């Protein structure tokens, strides 16, 4: 049985889903998106994802396709129809369909699509064994705080990592690590300080990042929101990434350098545990 997807007011089998070739998401990457993780058949921290979606649309002058309440109702219907117990729900809004022109069209109706993906998120190989990353030059645009569908540079970096036998890439700009291809980057220094890049237009304002930093503070960890270099990361005691789909996942190797002992560390493991507990409490 195929998945049921949502396209502009209709719930359809994925084989029947269609979008206009003039949709600006297709022609200009003129769209934004969110992914809410599913566990136990419910959405993790979904209100925060919808708030960020609202901000992304505002920053691009995009008209919302409907209210957040209507979006939530569609999301719940998607969960019901697809019966996904663990995975993710992808939501995309574009400026809509209009004859190709660089200028924003007047009167175009925003497009809204959704689909689900079933996959393990609680027990993964990356969480158990850690992941390896390579360093790549950050060639993305300067508004990374907007969660747009313009993901080709991130895709290129991810593929470069896979081609090199690694799992992912951390991107570097002006001598400092910005973030991963689809996650925020963190290190723990040898004196147990959690260091992560400060919020700005240079990185995505991660929903999971925010929750993990709050939980780390409650654990008593000292936190420094500042830039850090590749060398500092390679010499760290632990490293990890955060994202909605991976929660807290340890990084055990950067380029050819093991991080710490080259195995997942205890502080990162503890943060993953308490984040999963938080995630369960946030389900909707």
Image (spheres, rainbow, N blue to C red):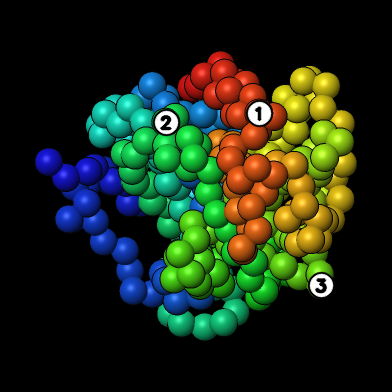
Disc 3 versus disc 1: distance between alpha carbons?
A: 31 Å
| Mark closer to the chain start, 3 or 1 | 3
Q: Which residue is mark 2?
A: 123
| Mark closer to the chain start, 1 or 2 | 2
Q: Which residue is mark 3?
A: 174
Q: Residue at x 66, y 28 (%)?
A: 266
Residue 106, placed above or below residue 117 = below
Q: Residues within 10 Å of mark 3 (few under 14, many from 20)?
A: few
**Which quadrant holds residue 11?**
top left
| Residue 36 percent location from the top left of the image | 49, 38
Residue 237, placed above or below residue 80 = below
Q: Secondary structure at mark 2?
A: loop
| Residue 96 percent location from the top left of the image | 46, 64
Looking at the rendered image, the disc whose residue lies closer to the viewer, 3 or 1, is 1
Q: Secondary structure at mark 1?
A: helix
| Mark closer to the chain start, 2 or 3 | 2
Q: Which residue is mark 1?
A: 266
């Amino acid at each position: 049985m195929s998945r049921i997807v949502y396209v502009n007011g209709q719930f359809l089998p994925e084989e029947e889903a269609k979008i206009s070739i003039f949709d600006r998401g297709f022609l200009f990457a003129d769209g934004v998106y969110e992914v809410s993780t599913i566990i136990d058949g419910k959405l993790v921290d979904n209100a925060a994802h919808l708030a960020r979606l609202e901000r992304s649309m505002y920053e691009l002058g995009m008209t919302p396709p409907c209210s957040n309440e209507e979006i939530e109702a569609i999301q719940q219907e998607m969960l019901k129809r697809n019966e996904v117990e663990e995975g993710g729900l992808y939501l995309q809004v574009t400026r809509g369909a209009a004859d190709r022109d660089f200028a924003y069209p007047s009167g175009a109706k925003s497009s809204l699509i959704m689909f689900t993906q079933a996959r393990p998120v609680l027990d993964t190989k990356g969480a158990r064994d850690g992941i390896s990353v390579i360093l790549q030059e950050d060639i993305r645009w300067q508004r990374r705080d907007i969660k747009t569908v313009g993901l080709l540079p991130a895709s290129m970096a991810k593929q470069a990592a896979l081609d090199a036998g690694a799992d992912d890439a951390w991107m570097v700009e002006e001598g400092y690590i910005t973030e991963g291809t689809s996650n925020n980057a963190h290190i723990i220094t040898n004196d147990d300080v959690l260091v992560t890049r400060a919020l700005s237009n240079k990185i995505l304002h991660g929903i999971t990042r925010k929750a993990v930093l709050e939980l780390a503070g409650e654990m008593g960890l000292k936190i420094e929101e500042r830039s850090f270099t590749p060398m500092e990361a390679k010499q760290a005691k632990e490293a990890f990434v955060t994202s909605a789909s991976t929660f807290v996942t340890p990084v055990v190797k950067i380029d050819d350098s093991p991080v710490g002992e080259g195995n997942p560390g205890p502080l990162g493991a503890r943060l993953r545990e308490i984040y999963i507990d938080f995630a369960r409490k946030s389900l909707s």
